Image (spheres, rainbow, N blue to C red):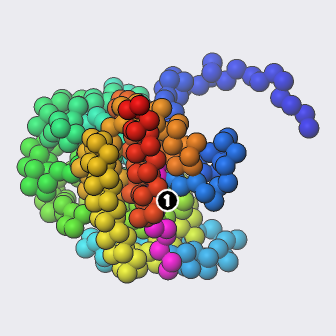
Amino acid sequence: MNTVSDSPDYTVLARKSALSQPIYEPGKPIEDVARELGLDPATIIKLASNENAFGASPAAIKAGKRALEQCELYPDGSCYRLKQLLAEMRGVSADQLIIGNGSNEIIELLGHAFLESGDEVVMGTPAFIVYKLVTLLFGGTPLEIPLVDYRHDLDSLAAAVTERTKLIFLPSPNNPTGTANSQEEIFSFVRSLPESVIFVFDEAYAEYLESPPDLRPLIEEGKKVICLRTFSKIYGLAGLRVGYGYAAPSMAQLLNQVRQPFNINSVAQAAAMAALEDNVFIEKCRKSNQEGLIQLEKGFSKIGLEFIPSVANFITVNVTDGNAVCQSLQKKGVIVRSMASYGMEEWVRVTVGSSDQNERLLTEFNKIVRNRGT
Ligand SMILES: Cc1ncc(COP(=O)(O)O)c(C=O)c1O
């Protein structure tokens, strides 16, 4: 095979923002760790990316397989049936919905639709890193406001707003801290914002809450609000890439205008519809997650590790040196995520696993802490 010996210099042609764009660091895939460390993939557990450790909805897998039989056809570019079902289940109308290739894509669509060079975007730190990446990609300026006690401080976010602010992101529960803001504080915050600002409420982990905030009244009263949800977490469909947003029809229309024509494949559409109706699976996951959080919190306390109490499907724990602990755990076949890229060098984030997975993780943590003591 020919090799490309003299790769041309494309940087002279590239957009400035592309050249300086930071690269997203995902949790390591099981196959990579197995290859690098010579481990059997079947023995490795991945608790690094806040996926669903309890798998995917069985109904969704069945529906996805069925849809695969017709993959020679383009998918429904409008996601008509998925939108109808979502509208019914979420109590919105279908024209309020935008479906994305993961909710990540909707964050990017917000950039396409609204961000111009020099626009400011207000976000907390540490918070989901994609808000910052998308802002930079479109030449915007991220204004990163430190969390207070690991929680978004809405007064500080409000104080950061200027006449150049276009978007504000609030994830609740937040990734990577697992902390949430109440409906009451969010309502008074949004009502205090100037009309020139769009409030993006990221509800990626909402299904893990008993009663998540409901921002539909704010949308109905004409506030500039979009809520984002995903099928990657409790529905267990991270690999299929589906998320959705609901907002005023005028917002949904704009985002639909700037997306690719067939952004959601047919397998993902079919699986998402089945997953939405699989209440038994969702309930089971919610309950197992709650049990898992308790198991991990008790375990961390026993070992003497500080953690941030979480209401999501992950928990962030202080291990003194996040990178080093991640490396040692990987050698034992346990993949977790260092929080160094979030500026939390001492911490790792751990996805809630099955009871056995959590036990294995705690055992490894315990060994690490005991070895340190000697
Ligand atoms: C807060 C938050 N928002 C959005 C996403 C992206 O989810 P999706 O898989 O739908 O792109 C994640 C993924 O981890 C997240 O933590």
Residue extent of the magenta highlight:
47-59
Position of 155 relative to 141 (above/below): below
| Nearer-the-camera pick, 44 or 77 | 44
- Residues packed near mark 1 inside 10 Å, few (<14), some (14 to 19) or many (20 plus): many
Work out which residue is located at the far right of the displayed protein and give it. Answer: 1
Residue 49 falls inside the magenta stretch = yes
| Nearer-the-camera pick, 318 or 7 | 318
Name the residue that disc number 1 marks: 238
Q: Position of residue 57 (x, y in %)?
A: 47, 74
Query: Looking at numbered disc 1 in the image, what kind of residue is underneath it?
Result: Ala
Answer with left or right where residue 159 lies relative to residue 358.
left
Asked whether residue 15 appears in the rendered view, the answer is yes
- What residue is drawn where x is 55% and y is 43%? 330
Label 1 CB less than 8 angstroms from ligand 1: yes
| Quadrant of the snapshot with the C terminus | top left
Asked whether residue 263 appears in the rendered view, the answer is no
Please identify the quarter of the rendering in which residue 9 is found.
top right
Answer with left or right where residue 171 lies relative to residue 112.
left
Residue 123 falls inside the magenta stretch = no
The majority secondary structure of the magenta stretch comes to loop
Numbered disc 1: secondary structure: helix
- What residue is drawn where x is 67% and y is 71%? 71
- What residue is drawn where x is 66% and y is 76%? 70
- What residue is drawn where x is 51% and y is 53%? 46
